[in-house]
Amino acid sequence: MRKIILVAAGLFVSASSQAQILDVIKSTVKDKTGIDLNTPIKTKSTTSTTTTTTTTTSPKTSSVNLNSLTSTEVSSGLKQALNLGVTEGVKKLGVTDGFYKNELVKILMPEKLRTIDTKLRMVGLGSLADQGVKLLNRAAEDAVTESAPIFANAITSMTITDAKNILLGTDNAATNYLQTKTQSQLFTAFQPKVKASLGKVGADTVWKNLISKYNMLTGQAVTTDLNEYVTTETINGVFKMVAEKESGIRNNSVMRTTSILQKVFGAQDSK
């Protein structure tokens, strides 16, 4: 018992300080979003990354019969596959729980703030940490639709040579091409939208109060740029969805839902 008391005291100084944090943040969330933090939110802990990691496989060069395809068909097939990936990905992510309940793209606690998450849970404030994560995902869901026109421009500008190289490439070659062409533009376009979204859902105020109170009570100086973090994770989420769709089209004939997709990607199945 004594050990538990010492741990709690070391983290937040006193029970009244814990209550201060909870009251301030609960009030802010309720004012901003109408969400009552008295209802616990169940989450599944996993490890988050801030860079897109796609699975690579051996190139399909030896198993693609380009002789059966015209340059126009190759280009049209690859553009259609990317358009499908982007359209479906953005549509799935840009709704309530599009990020939050999708374990492939869910945005977790920033690395620098995980010490706060651990300590909040140790003193019974896990629901507060869960709500903070939920609000980060809400901001991403609100911002993700900004990517559509940028992707459309990159896909339209794909050359015949680009298309042939992509078809002969790995399972995520088209996604990698799109990422190379759009990453910096997406970040520039997303940042102001994410910033606005963080404010819209109340995440910025919640995290500012949480971090400030934590630092004041513990004498630490934990900081993080939530805008940059959520922007990066939102972009990563879109590319993960596109990569998943691309891999499906390449490896599963059922997902080739148009004649051009069947012809272009079917050519990789014949020698």
Image (cartoon, helix red, strand yellow):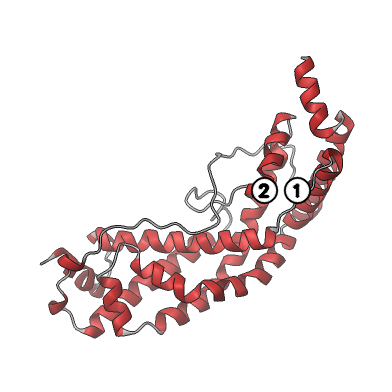
Look at 24% across and 75% down and name the residue there: 260
Q: Residue at x 63, y 59 (%)?
A: 230
131 vs 100, left or right, is right
Q: Quick check: can you spot residue 36?
A: yes
The reply to whether dot 2 and dot 1 touch (C-beta < 8 Å) is yes
Q: Residues within 10 Å of mark 2 (few under 14, many from 20)?
A: few
The N terminus, quarter of image: top right
Rendered image: mark on residue 112: 2
Decide: is 223 above or below 182: above
- Of residue 190 and residue 54, the one placed in the foreground of this image is 54
Is residue 197 shown left or right of residue 26?
A: left
Which comes before the other along the chain, label 2 or label 1? 2
> At 34% from the left edge and 84% from the top edge, which residue is drawn?
159
On screen, residue 158 above or below 126: below
Q: Is residue 183 left or right of residue 33?
A: left
Disc 2 is placed on an element classified as: helix
Q: Where 133 falls versus 7 (above or below)?
A: below
Residue 222: numbered disc = 1
* Residue 30 visible in the current orientation: no
Residue 267 picture location, percent across and down: 17, 70
Q: Position of residue 174 (x, y in %)?
A: 36, 70
Dot 1 amino acid type: Val
**Looking at the image, which residue sits at the far left?**
271
